[in-house]
Amino acid sequence: MAEQQIAPIQLVQGVLTLSAPLWPTLDSFIVGENTKTLQQLTAWLQAASPTVSYLTGEASSGKTHLAQAILSQHSQQGLPCAFISAKDSAGLRPERLQGMEQLSLICIDDADRLLVQPAWRTAIQQLVSLMRDSGGMILLVQRTAAAYEQLLGLNFSLVALSNDAEKRQLLLERAQQRSIQLSKEVTNWLMKHYAEDVGQLMHVLAYLDHGSMTLKHPITLPFAKKLLLQS
């Protein structure tokens, strides 16, 4: 019998609602050197002005996690929100923004991928204009603070986790959230081989979880090595 294989994890892209109970929370965000940035971002959300602002930072700085956590908090407060992922914008159309001006908060992840497209830039500018009247806010999540004249706003810049203690804490917290039992030897091995890129570390954890559930096998060190080194 052929050995069962698992497919790489695919992230669902597009416009998402926040009914999913397993979205990140602010409590699970490892602040690191971003205390001031988080305070400024919180102040902007409370002031609801200006309408549009930016959340920027290098890869693996936690931008997407923080944006989703903020939206999750708003949703739990009964405020209508939406999260738009532009990682794969091929299936997205600017028309998806129509009617969203009634929402309290919209986050557009990888916004720079859309803003370079004239049709999308126009649609986002129009949405911002409508949300100024309705009192809603838009958070554009991207790597740099590059902004267009019609989309000027505040910039909240995140710094990626820099030390292994913070990265280990993040790994263990994400494992706990997924109800994953990580032994000390598995944790040490993951940190040794994948901790340089936090984003990759989180992807590896998700892949191990997926493989463990699919193959119905606990995450032991031999299992992790076999699964990851053959991927």
Image (cartoon, rainbow, N blue to C red):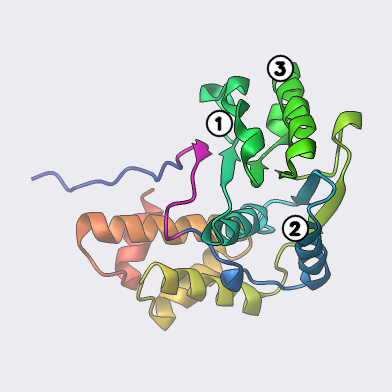
For marks 1 and 3, the one nearer the N-term is 1
Q: Quadrant of residue 165 in the image?
A: bottom right
Circle 3 sits on which residue? 119
Based on the picture, tell me whether residue 21 belongs to the magenta stretch: yes
For marks 1 and 2, the one nearer the N-term is 2
Q: Secondary structure at mark 3?
A: helix
- Callout 1 amino acid: Asp
Mark 2–mark 3 Cα distance, whole angstroms, equals 28 Å
Region rendered in magenta:
12-22
Which residue does the image show at 76% across and 21% down from the upper left? 122
Indicate which disc residue 45 carries: 2
For marks 2 and 3, the one nearer the N-term is 2
- Callout 3 amino acid: Ala
Mark 1–mark 3 Cα distance, whole angstroms, equals 16 Å
Nearer the observer, 67 or 101: 101
Circle 1 sits on which residue? 88
